[in-house]
Image (cartoon, coloured by chain):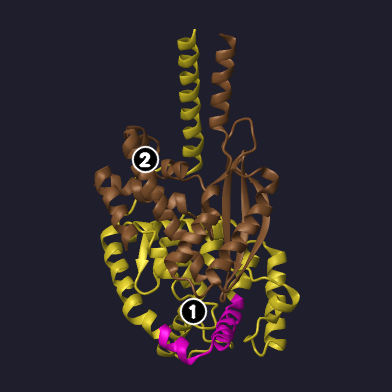
Chain colours: A yellow, B brown
Amino acid sequence: MKKIILLLSLIVFSIAEDSFDQDFDSEFANTNVEIFDPLSGYNRLMTTFNDKVYLNVLNPTAKTYSYVMPETARKGIDNFFKNLMFPVRFTNNLLQLKFQNSAEELGRFLVNTIWGLGGFMDVAKSELNLQAHEEDFGQTLGFYGVGGGVHIVLPLLGPSNLRDIVGMSTDSYLSALSTTGSSSINYRIPNNSLEQVGIKAFDAVNIVSLKQGQYESLKKDALDLYPFLRDVYSQARKKQIEE
Amino acid sequence: MLRNIIKILLFIMISVSYANALKKDSIKEEMTKKIDNVLVVLSKKELSTSEKGEEIIKIIDDVFDYELMARISLGKDTWGSLSKEKRKEFVKVFENKLKNSYIEKLDLYNDQEVEIISLKPYNKTRLQLETQLVGSDETYTINYNFYNKSKSNDEWFIYDIDLLGVSIIQTYRQQFSGLLKEKSFDEILTLLETSNKE
């Protein structure tokens, strides 16, 4: 009698265990699917290159910069650059039919430019609680169902994919900080490619100075850096496209 | 005879209940307390990083279901193929890795505000606690996914954390499955152990 009870409970328990596992296994992505990564050789090299540039050039520069520039100033500069990217965010919010968000973006731009000292202060967020709605053309394409395509690691810019590269190039036609395309857009700041690179480099150093330690901390979860960054990128983009 | 069966059943029921789990209604409150306590520990300048780590582990340890996290990360097939001792070993090493990883990330943001946003249903039977960390350059969403470990009671544990949409268990799952194609399980275990020591 006791043996039967024991046997029954073991069977019930093992069935429960198995279905339990199935439950979780289906929630997370199927790992048996081979990831199509034809450029993996190149991507690995570029990841190592970017990693070295970050650790030996970008990060030390950002650290030194942060000693000289107080945090409020660096935040102000960050706000200023972010404010300038309004045309890109606004257009892409519209393209995704996110009208409420577009209106809020417009509101943010006007309030921050007029009352926020030309964009240095994010008064729209602190006073009016208007949050930014980060959208770019890569997300717009993703919104309309375009898959990411092959994973490509860009020099200095880091992980990306085919769709997002197309997205970035398209956005640069509208961006205030680039020189792509028609020169009839009046709000363009850089006069030539050299200035564009200079401004972008400064922006990058400023951003890294505000995010100190994050990359190193992220790397600690990596057992194999390149696939890890590739996976992190695809998960993060998926989330960005969804919202 | 009947008395013996009842005794056995009672024993099983007691040993299977999890005293440290959270009840559904108290998740928000408890997690708020825990996160606040963790931030207080992190702000104590007089403690060393390892001392802070020990204190933090005491606060957060009982809500994480490390064994489940280890099991999901390794995947059903690999987990099924391991002996009990190997499983135990793996869970221990993986647990350390996760703890160190979580504490390190918190350490970066100890000066900033953490807000608990809401507790929402997630994936039919689960719950997700949304929190937000207001950083100097952007706001980071950190979500804690809870599941009910007990079939009949209210015992909720954390089985995944996601930061900006990147799930930690998903990243480990992807990494392990990639590595297992080329390395043996023992090599991966050693890899984890060495990375813990760094």
Name the amino acid, label 1.
Answer: Ile
Mark 2: few/some/many CA within 10 Å (<14, 14-19, 20+): some
Tell me if A208 is positioned left or right of B139 in this view: left
Quarter of image, res B60? bottom right
Q: Residue at x 65, y 49 (%)?
A: B27
Residue B187 magenta-highlighted: no
Is B193 above or below relative to A137? Answer: above
Residue tagged by mark 2? B88
Front residue of A117/B37: it is B37
Report the residue at 38% width, 62% height from top. A220
The C terminus of chain B is located in which quarter?
bottom left
Q: Main secondary structure of the magenta part?
A: helix
Q: Which residues are magenta?
A: A62-87
Residue under the image location 26 percent in, 60 percent down: A41
User: At numbered mark 2, what does the secondary structure look like: helix, strand or loop?
Assistant: helix
Image location of residue B79, percent across then percent down: 36, 37
- The crowd level at tag 1 (other Cα within 10 Å; few <14, some 14-19, many 20+) is some
Query: A166 left or right of A54?
Result: right
The reply to whether residue A93 is visible in this rendering is yes
Q: Which residue is mark 1?
A: A207
Q: Residue B173, image x and y in percent? A: 40, 47
Vertical side of B32 occupied by B185: above or below: above
Three-letter amino acid code at the position of disc 2: Lys
**In the figure, is residue B120 to the left or right of B42?**
right
Tell me which chain the residue with mark 2 is part of. B
Q: How many marks?
A: 2
Q: Nearer the viewer, residue A47 or B113?
A: B113
Q: CA distance from mark 1 to mark 2?
A: 42 Å
The question of residue A64 being in magenta is answered with yes
